Image (spheres, helix red, strand yellow):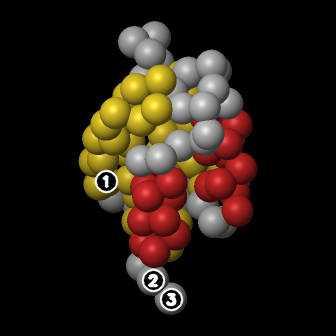
Amino acid sequence: MNEPVRAHVIISGRVQGVFFRAETQRSASGLNLSGWVKNNHDGTVEAVFEGEESNVNQMLIWCRKGPPRSRVDHVAVEWERFSGEFSGFNVRF
């Protein structure tokens, strides 16, 4: 089993209005990750992923592509200390 990790990401490009949050939630839940995703006022999407390192890395690969109608220009990743504070993966508003 991989060690649990936490990645805090900011995704920029055409990432709002293209079901990015809903698809992120679906993908993260499918990888058994916990955390959250939300739209920011500056047009970016922000998310925190916690779980096994290999699953978080798979999610980061997904984030660099996004759902079909999106265009991802950049994914900034900050690795933080795993907290275990979340139960499930949610969309924040």
Q: Are marks 3 and 1 in contact (CB under 8 Å)?
A: no
- Residue 44 showing in the rendered view: yes
Relative to 93, is 45 on the left or the right?
A: left
Which one is earlier in the sequence, the residue at label 3 or at label 1? 3
Badge 3 density bin: few <14, some 14–19, many ≥20, Cα 10 Å: few
Distance from disc 2 to disc 3, alpha carbons, whole Å, reads: 4 Å
The answer to whether residue 91 is visible is no
- Residue closest to the far bottom: 1
Q: Position of residue 43 (x, y in %)?
A: 44, 16
Residue 66, percent from left and from top = 53, 43
Q: Nearer the viewer, residue 68 or 51?
A: 68
Q: SS class of the residue under badge 1?
A: strand
Q: Which residue is mark 3?
A: 1
Image quarter where the C terminus lies is top right
In the rendered structure, which amino acid carries the disc numbered 3? Met
Q: Is residue 64 above or below residue 46?
A: below
- Marking on residue 2: 2
- Residue placed farthest to the top in the image? 41
Going by the numbered disc 1, the residue's amino acid type is Glu
Q: Which mark is residue 80?
A: 1
Horizontal and vertical percent for residue 64?
Answer: 42, 47
Q: Residues within 10 Å of mark 2 (few under 14, many from 20)?
A: few
Q: At x 34% / y 33%, what residue is drawn?
A: 73
Cα distance between the residues tagged 1 and 2: 16 Å
Is residue 2 placed above or below 87 in the rendered structure?
A: below
- Report if the CB atoms under discs 2 and 3 are less than 8 Å apart: yes
Amino acid residing under circle 2? Asn
